[in-house]
Amino acid sequence: MAAYAALLSLMHIIDNLRLHPRPPINLHHKQAHFLTEKVTHLLDFLRRYNPRLGYSTEADPLELRIADAAYAAEDIIESHIVDQITGDGGEMSFEALYQALDKVIQDMNLIEEEAMEIERGLGVLDHVQENSTYSDSKRSSSMVGVEDVKIQLMDKLTSDCRDLLIIPIAGMGGTGKTTLARAIYQERLITEHFDTCAWATISQEYSVTQILAEILGLGNDQHSSVGELGEKLHKHLFGRRYLVVMDDMWDIQAWDRVRVYFPNNKNGSRVVVTTRLSNLASDLSSKSSSLEMGLLDEAHSWDLLSKTVFAEESCPLHLEEIGKRIAKSCKGLPLSIVVIGGLLSKSEHTSEFWEYIEKNLSPIVNLEDDERCLKILQLSYKQLPVHLKPCFLYMGIFSEDEVIHASRVVRLWIAEGFFIKPVSGKSSKEVGKMYVKELADRNLVLVHKIGSIGGIKECKMHDLLRDFCLREARKERFYSFVDGEDETNARRGIVIPTTSMEEVEHALQSMPQTRSLIWGQDGKPPSLRLRWLRIIQSTKPFVYQETMLQLVNLRHVTDVSLEEESVFPSMQRFWNLETLIIKGNGSKFSLPAEIWCMPHMRHIQVKYVHLPDPPVGHAAADDNGDDGGCVLQNLHSLKRITNFKCSEDVVKRIPNIKKLGVYYNEFDERLQVENLVSLDKLESLKFVIFQPPPKGTEGVSRMDGQSLNFPHSLKKLTLGLHYSKFSQQVLGMIGVLPHLEKLRLDSGSFEERKWETVEGQFSRLKFLEISRSTIVEWKMEGSHFPRLEKLVLRRLYYMQEIPLEVAEIPTLGSIYFMNAAN
């Protein structure tokens, strides 16, 4: 909810000022104490507050008052910070700051008294599932009740008809069209039947180039034309038996504009299209080729609900009748059933709570389908633990059908201040990952991709769930679209591609309170004069502008494109910066030395940028342990750094680094890479050497283990030695890393062009990839790699054979062998 997020954000500001070694302002210690106390009390209240109110198009008045009070405190504090750093607008005196905050504290006192009065009332706080249990068991998928449709689809895909067939799957939102298509797409029978398979998501707002690029597996190709991509796709599909799934199509023109690139190879190729529109299904193909996803009957509805809540266990007898009535109330819509099931699975399994859910479902049973589903989602949202509510609503900022990287959304949650204190000793990032999993466990986000060693890597959001987030966010003034039409006084603004730059500029002028800007536009943005802006999250290249130097409260800046080096000389003005991701070639500039005195920095990613030595005269820590702001305690991720000098001084200044990506086009002892072993918190390392050998020497140099050693904390390692050899010494050293689960060996050659693994090495490795190497022979025993789950061999043109012993690895689930040039 917006109120809870506002309080957390205010607490985040107070804590950052308190912990900063050189804060731009100092709050009166007494006021800081009172503010912290009031915020803590109101947070505790909101964790228990759940008024017995039905669905309303208006936000709860008390929650709005709490949010407004927190916003008022933020505005006062951040205005003073901006004035202090920039000198613009006239500085607020310390006395004026004190008086303004004193008024806010008095307002919070009144709100706190009202909250206490409410708590003393009867029946107002009810059924808040704060202490939900976290189960790691995987509930069964929502394929219950569609077995007949699944069989029909399998038959159509593998039938003897040799012509290219278009197979539409039609049905209302939430009936499981995408779930069915995805399940079939991943069936082993299907993947073996077709030579190549591809998936593209269309949505209401689509790009033909993006559709073609997605089918080709090229990601977001912004450089090729439709004709170029279409020709490439036609060549790729020609002569092959192919399956292409086009998910969530809304317009026949989307198919008409790409159909010419799908050759009819007369070999049984198929195109599956999912759509909500029955008339579109008729336009795409004959009725005999179409499939209709209907609603579930009562028996299948209960079966799906029971499996969602209890997985493979049986429902307790005292809950069965109530459960069947709850399932019936969902009117056969699978999405509604799995969302309610996600709620019930996380609650106490008591008759009282289940009857409460049934009672709240009763008034919405006879509504129209989409409206009924949205109100079922409202019930599930209302029962979310309060710490998950802002995180869930935040997912609506991403565009329809967008693949959302879990690490990206977690960084945004952190920048927004949604986490304050570590949970059970976990870092903010670990807490964020836990929250993503909780939302997935409740079926509020869809898992799109699991990482190579486990954990959710990518997720998506169902259209109806996103629609609900947008409705609720507008109601609570949590965020709004920057389009001149959305008049809510929200703290977060979303710029979508269809809004003209003139409309964006006009709308931003009336949104001075904006703290977060989610940028989805092409082209150079208008001059930013949002003096309180903290977050610029860009999905398109966001061209840097001089006025950004006035945005001294920035915490999170991504995908900003630099035309010149002017951003860096005044970097320390951004006193609170946590995330910096710069697009483009960083070889034009270096990070400034003052980067070492930015204590809140968490994530730096600038392509091939040089990291300077720490400033001379700034010790890593004095005798009293005071680092003077020159130890980056919070820095966890440092990526794409060129010629990283790993001196002892640098190691001391990044003691908690967990992800590191370094590239060397110069490599010698001056870079002191032997000190990498001292980064004892490092979990993920990408280490790449591009340095060609000197003229007149052997074409490939040998990389030994004397200058290269890795910390035992490593879980993921990518080692790219483009002009060097993987020596047995280095491979042996890697093999004994006790926690290593993922290993990529790229481009290096092997001594004598062979690799002979040893018993006891790679004991925890789950993922292994060898690519672009001249290896000829690989010798191993069946007992080696005892936990390997996935093996990828890419562009190994000289390898004679995959060792037969690989087949003896009991945990191995897949082998990918690709010698194509892509």
Image: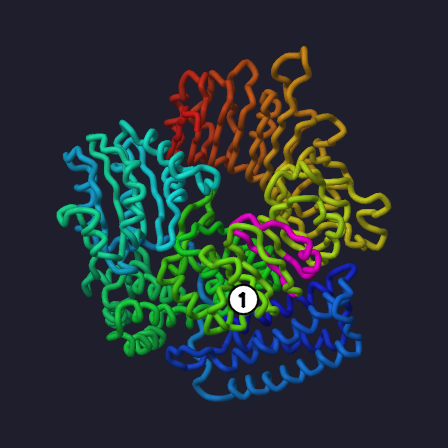
Whether 718 is drawn above or below 294: the answer is above
- Residue 300 left/right relative to 470: left
Q: Residue furthest front?
A: 502
Residue drawn at x 20%, y 45% is 153
Q: Residue furthest left?
A: 288
Provide the residue span drawn in magenta: 532-555
Determine if residue 630 is in view.
yes
Residue drawn at x 23%, y 64% is 332
Amino acid type at image mark 1: Ala
The residue lying toward the viewer, choosing from 576 and 246, is: 246
Quadrant into which the C terminus falls: top left
Dot 1, crowdedness within 10 Å: few (<14), some or many (≥20)?
A: some
Residue 191 highlighted magenta (yes or no): no
The residue lying toward the viewer, choosing from 111 and 692, is: 692
Location of residue 391 in the rendering, given as x and y in whole percent from the top left corner? 50, 63
Q: Which residue is mark 1?
A: 507
State the count of labels: 1
Q: Quadrant of residue 739?
A: top right
Determine if residue 186 is in view.
no
Q: Residue furthest top?
A: 696
Q: How is the image coloured?
A: rainbow
Whether 310 is drawn above or below 247: the answer is below
Q: Secondary structure at mark 1?
A: helix
The residue lying toward the viewer, choosing from 729 and 561, is: 561
- Residue 211 left/right relative to 18: left
